[in-house]
Image (spheres, grey):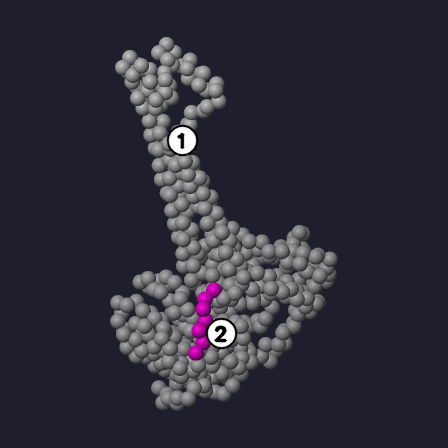
C-alpha cells in the first residue's frame, strides 16, 4: 500500500511539473511573438540585392550639372544595392543603418562618400528632403564603393539596432 | 493459518485445513513447502497487476512530451519570425486610395483633395539642384477630443520607390504664405480640431511624375506609437500642376 502511495505522489509530481513546463513554454512563445511585432528586437534588416559594376568612372547628372568621380588607379567602382526593411516602429532619417565595408586587406575596399552635388552651404529644406525610411517599409538603398582589382569578395557589416550584435554580409564581386 | 493459495486467514482446526474461501487444502506443518510443491506442478498464481505503474509511466511520458514541446515551440516560431523578417518584404499592409476618396483612419476621416507643384530648383533660389517643391492638400475630420491621444503621425511621400519626409511646418511657413498653401498641417492637427483643411509640403526629385502620400494608422499609448496597424496611401499624379477635382480658394 505504501508502495502504491509513493508511486501516486511521484506521478502527480511529474504531471504537475509537466503542465507547468508546457504552460511556461507556450507563454514564452507568445510573449516573444508579440514582442517581435510591437517593439522589434532589431530595427531593420539588410539584404544584399544586387552588385553592379560601374567601371573606373562614376557619373551622374543632377539638375544642370554632371558630376563624376574617377576611381583610384587599380580600383573599380561598384554600386552595391541593399534591400533594407525597417522592422521597428520609428523612422530612419536615412535609407537604413550605417553600413561598413571591409576587405581582407585594409586597402581592398573603400566607400565613396563624396559623390553627388556639393554646395558651399546646405540647400533649402535640406534636412527634410533627405532619404527616409518609414516604419514597416522597404527600400533599395545604393552604396558606391571602389574595390581593388583582383579582390573577389569583401564584407558589409551593420547593426540591426543600436544594441544588437553586428551582422556581417558577404559581398562577392567579379 | 493463512491459505497458501488466496492468503485468506482461517482457523485450521475449525475447517480441517480446507480454506473457506477457495477450497484449497493446506497442510498444517508447512504451508510454504506446499506452496513450493504447488508451483512445481507448473501452475502459476495469477499475479495481480501492480497498481500505480501505468499512471506513473503515463506521468513520466507526459512530462517528457511537455519538456520537448516547450523547447521546440519557441524554436519553431522563432524560425518563422526570422524568416518573415529576412524576406525584405514590406512589414505593414498598405491600402491604396484615390484622390478625393474619403477613408477612415484611427476614428478620423481623411480625404486628399489636391496636389500642387509649387516650384523647382530653377526658380526657387536655394533649393537643391534637381529637386522640386510640391504641396498636398488634405481635409479631415475627427472628434477633436484631446484626451483620445488620437494624433495623426506625420505623413510621408513615396516616389519612385524612395521615401521623403514632410517639410516641417515651422520651416515652410514663410514659403507657404508665398505659395498660398495655408494653413499648414502638422501632427497636432485633428487632436484639438474637429475638422481641418490644409497642406503638407515635400521636396521630391525633379523628374518625379507620380507620388503616393502615406498616412500611418497607429495604436497610440499616450503620445507614443504602440503599434503600426496599417498604411493608407493615396496616389497622386504630378503631370499637371494640380491633382483632384476640387478647386479651392487659396488662403
User: Spatial distance from mark 2 to mark 1, Cα to Cα?
Assistant: 76 Å
- What secondary structure is found at the residue carrying circle 2? strand
Please, is residue A157 above or below residue B223 in the view? above
What residue is at 33 percent from the left and 20 percent from the top?
B19
Reply yes or no: does residue B96 show up in magenta.
Answer: yes
| x and y percentages locating residue B56 in the rendered image | 40, 35
Residue B214 visible in image: no
Residue numbers of the magenta segment: B91-97
Callout 1: SS:
loop
Q: Chain of mark 1?
A: B
- What x and y, as percent, mark residue B157? 46, 74
Which quadrant would residue A17 be assigned to in this image? Answer: top left
Most extreme residue toward the top is: B29
The answer to if B116 sits in the magenta stretch is no
Q: In this rendering, would A59 be left or right of B91?
A: right
* Numbered label tally: 2
Determine which residue is flagged by label 2. Answer: B158
Image position, residue A108 (x, y; %): 67, 56
Name the quarter where the N terminus of chain A is drawn.
Answer: top left
From the image, tell me which residue sits under label 1: B49
Amino acid at each position: 500500500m505504501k508502495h502504491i502511495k509513493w508511486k501516486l505522489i511521484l506521478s502527480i509530481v511529474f504531471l504537475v511539473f509537466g503542465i507547468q513546463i508546457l504552460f511556461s513554454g507556450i507563454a514564452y512563445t507568445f510573449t516573444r511573438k508579440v514582442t517581435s511585432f510591437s517593439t522589434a528586437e532589431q530595427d531593420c534588416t539588410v539584404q544584399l540585392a544586387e552588385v553592379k559594376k560601374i567601371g573606373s568612372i562614376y557619373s551622374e547628372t543632377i539638375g544642370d550639372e554632371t558630376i563624376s568621380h574617377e576611381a583610384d588607379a587599380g580600383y573599380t567602382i561598384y554600386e552595391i544595392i541593399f534591400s533594407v526593411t525597417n522592422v521597428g516602429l520609428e523612422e530612419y532619417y536615412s535609407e537604413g543603418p550605417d553600413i561598413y565595408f571591409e576587405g581582407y586587406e585594409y586597402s581592398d575596399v573603400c566607400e565613396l562618400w563624396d559623390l553627388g552635388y556639393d554646395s558651399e552651404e546646405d540647400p533649402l529644406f535640406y534636412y527634410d528632403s533627405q532619404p527616409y525610411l518609414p516604419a514597416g517599409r522597404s527600400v533599395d538603398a545604393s552604396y558606391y564603393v571602389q574595390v581593388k582589382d583582383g579582390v573577389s569578395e569583401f564584407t558589409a557589416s551593420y547593426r540591426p539596432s543600436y544594441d544588437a550584435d553586428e551582422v556581417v554580409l558577404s559581398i562577392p564581386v567579379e | 493459518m493463512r491459505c497458501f493459495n488466496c492468503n485468506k486467514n482461517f482457523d485450521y482446526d475449525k475447517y480441517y485445513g480446507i480454506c473457506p474461501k477457495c477450497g484449497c487444502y493446506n497442510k498444517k506443518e508447512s504451508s510454504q513447502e506446499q506452496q513450493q510443491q504447488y508451483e512445481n506442478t507448473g501452475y502459476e498464481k495469477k499475479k495481480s497487476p501492480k497498481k500505480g505503474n501505468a499512471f506513473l509511466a503515463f506521468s513520466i511520458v507526459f512530462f517528457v512530451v511537455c519538456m520537448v514541446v516547450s523547447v521546440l515551440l519557441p524554436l519553431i516560431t522563432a524560425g518563422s519570425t526570422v524568416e518573415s523578417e529576412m524576406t525584405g518584404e514590406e512589414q505593414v499592409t498598405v491600402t491604396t486610395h484615390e484622390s478625393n476618396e474619403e477613408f477612415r483612419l484611427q476614428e478620423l476621416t481623411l480625404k486628399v483633395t489636391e496636389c500642387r507643384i509649387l516650384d523647382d530648383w530653377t526658380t526657387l533660389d536655394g533649393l537643391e539642384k534637381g529637386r522640386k517643391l510640391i504641396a498636398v492638400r488634405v481635409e479631415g475630420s475627427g472628434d477633436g477630443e484631446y484626451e483620445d491621444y488620437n494624433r495623426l503621425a506625420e505623413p510621408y511621400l513615396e516616389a519612385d520607390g524612395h521615401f521623403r519626409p514632410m517639410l516641417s511646418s515651422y520651416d515652410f511657413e514663410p514659403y507657404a504664405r508665398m505659395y498660398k498653401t495655408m494653413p499648414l498641417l502638422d501632427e497636432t492637427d485633428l487632436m484639438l480640431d474637429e475638422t481641418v483643411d490644409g497642406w503638407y509640403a515635400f521636396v521630391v526629385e525633379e523628374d518625379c511624375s507620380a507620388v503616393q502620400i502615406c498616412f500611418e494608422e497607429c495604436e497610440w499609448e499616450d503620445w507614443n506609437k504602440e503599434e503600426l496597424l496599417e498604411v493608407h496611401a493615396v496616389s497622386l499624379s504630378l503631370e499637371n500642376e494640380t491633382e483632384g477635382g476640387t478647386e479651392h480658394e487659396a488662403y
